[in-house]
Structures are given as C-alpha cells and as structure tokens.
Image (tube, rainbow, N blue to C red):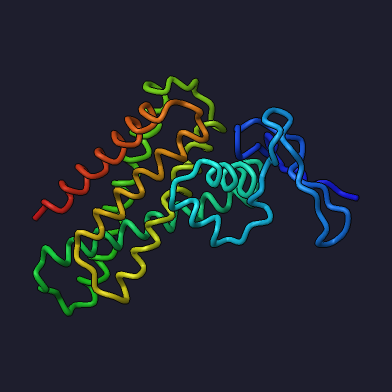
C-alpha cells in the first residue's frame, strides 16, 4: 500500500486551501481511496478522478478549486520537473506575445511587407525583443505590486511561486495559435488579454490568499504597464 505524497510544501485541499498529508491512498493499480481534509471534512481533491476536460472547463469558469488543484497538487515548485515547466511556460508565454505583437504590427503596416530575407530576420528579432521587454516590465511591476500592495516579505521561493501561478494561469494565450489558421478580428486579442487578466487575478488570489480587490490591483497595474510599453513600441517609426 502506498501514498501519494507531494513534494515541497505538500498538497492542499481544493475546498478550503488547508494543507493535507496526502491526497489519496493507493491499494493497487487503479484502486485508490481519496482522502478527506481534516479542516473542512470534505474530500481534499476530487479532481484527481476527473477528466482533463472537466478541469479545463472549471479553469475557464475561474473556479478556485480547479486553480488549487493545478497550482498546488498537479504542479508544484517543489520539484525540478516543475521548475522546468516554469521555464518552458515562460518561453511559450514570450513567444505568444511576440506573435501578438507581430500581428498588431502587421495590421498597422496595412499589408506592406519586405521580400528581403535579412529584413524578415531583423523583424523577427525585433518582435522577440519587444515581447521580451514587455514581459520584463510586466514581471517587475507584478513583483513590485506583490511587495508593496500585498506586502509580502521578500522571499525568492515565494516570488517564484507567484510568477509560476501567473504564467500558468495565462494559458488562454494559447488561443492565439488558432489565429495562425483562422482569421479573427483584432478585437479577439483584447478579449484574450482580458480573460488572461481575470485568470491571473484568481491564480494570484489562490497562491497569496489575499482579497480579490488587492490581487486585481496588482495584476491590473502589471498588465497596464505592459500594455503602455507595447503601445510605445507599436508607436515607434
């Protein structure tokens, strides 16, 4: 008989957020018993037996239970594997922002393009640099907000958890991949960004346990700084 033990600080109940020793006990392959939370007396994490699509739907509906399952029980900054997920997710995050900036610049250019391969390569590096700058500003403002609005003491592990939660909760940016196949109005980008903002608020609230208004203020400040940076970039000749 074996237990499911999480690394790092341990798993949490998706209902109340309290720490639990283990999420389930496995008696044999395919035969498990879900454990209850000592605090709220409910099953600690019923999502363990749920299909991914059910979890995804609850994430889209911004249910904190689903976010706790993903951030504390499914993924955790306590293992090197999940640190790798953080780095890969950051790269994907920047790449998607680069595509969004490229799309906006393409609309602004009204179809004018250069056939020079050197010009194309230069434009690619320029767009990636613009996306990197925007994300650096975003992360700086996010961490400043966490430090001075949420007043969290400086701790590298805690701040990395915040970045991890915000980047993972930006999953809806993956919708931008569909714009490579189908045509959408540019207003869709704004809708995606608003959804990402609201998702970031829920994720920050889950990992920080601060009121929603405070978390909204922090995320709004970071997104606004990033938006203004990108407006300045797009306004350059």
Q: Nearer the viewer, residue 15 or 89?
A: 15
Tell me what residue is drawn at x 91 percent, y 50 percent.
1
Vertical order, 131 against 154 (above or below): below
Quadrant of image for the C terminus: bottom left
Vertical order, 227 against 184 (above or below): above
In the visual, does 114 lie left or right of 154? left
In the visual, does 80 lie left or right of 144? right
> Residue 2: horizontal and vertical position, in percent?
87, 49
Q: Is residue 144 visible?
A: no
Q: Quadrant of residue 42?
A: top right
Q: Is residue 107 visible?
A: yes
In the visual, does 137 lie left or right of 207? left
> Residue 94: horizontal and vertical position, in percent?
37, 55
Q: Nearer the viewer, residue 150 or 198?
A: 198
Numbered-mark total: 0
Tell me what residue is drawn at x 43 percent, y 58 percent.
92
Tell me what residue is drawn at x 69 percent, y 40 percent.
44
In the visual, does 102 lie left or right of 62? left
Q: Quadrant of residue 111?
A: bottom left
> Residue 72: horizontal and vertical position, in percent?
61, 41
Single out the residue that lies furthest toward the right. Answer: 1
Single out the residue that lies furthest toward the front. Answer: 41
Q: Nearer the viewer, residue 51 or 228?
A: 51
Tell me what residue is drawn at x 32 percent, y 56 percent.
97
């Amino acid at each position: 008989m074996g237990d499911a033990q999480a690394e790092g600080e341990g798993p949490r109940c998706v209902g109340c957020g309290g720490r639990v020793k283990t999420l389930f006990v496995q008696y044999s392959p395919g035969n498990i018993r879900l454990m209850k939370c000592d605090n709220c007396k409910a099953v600690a994490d019923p999502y363990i037996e749920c299909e991914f699509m059910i979890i995804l739907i609850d994430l889209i509906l911004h249910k904190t239970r689903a976010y706790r399952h993903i951030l504390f029980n499914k993924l955790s900054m306590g293992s090197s594997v999940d640190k790798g997920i953080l780095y890969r997710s950051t790269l994907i995050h920047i790449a998607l922002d680069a595509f969004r900036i490229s799309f906006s610049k393409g609309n602004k250019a009204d179809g004018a393009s250069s056939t020079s391969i050197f010009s194309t390569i230069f434009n690619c590096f320029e767009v990636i640099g613009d996306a990197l700058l925007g994300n650096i500003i975003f992360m700086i403002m996010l961490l400043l907000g966490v430090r001075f609005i949420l007043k969290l003491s400086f701790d590298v592990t805690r701040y990395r958890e915040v970045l991890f939660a915000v980047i993972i909760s930006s999953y809806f940016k993956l919708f931008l991949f569909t714009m490579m196949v189908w045509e959408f109005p540019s207003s869709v980008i704004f809708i995606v960004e608003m959804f990402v903002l609201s998702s970031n608020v829920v994720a920050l609230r889950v990992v920080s346990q601060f009121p929603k208004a405070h978390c909204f203020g922090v995320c709004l400040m970071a997104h606004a700084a990033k938006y203004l940076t990108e407006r300045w970039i797009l306004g350059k000749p």
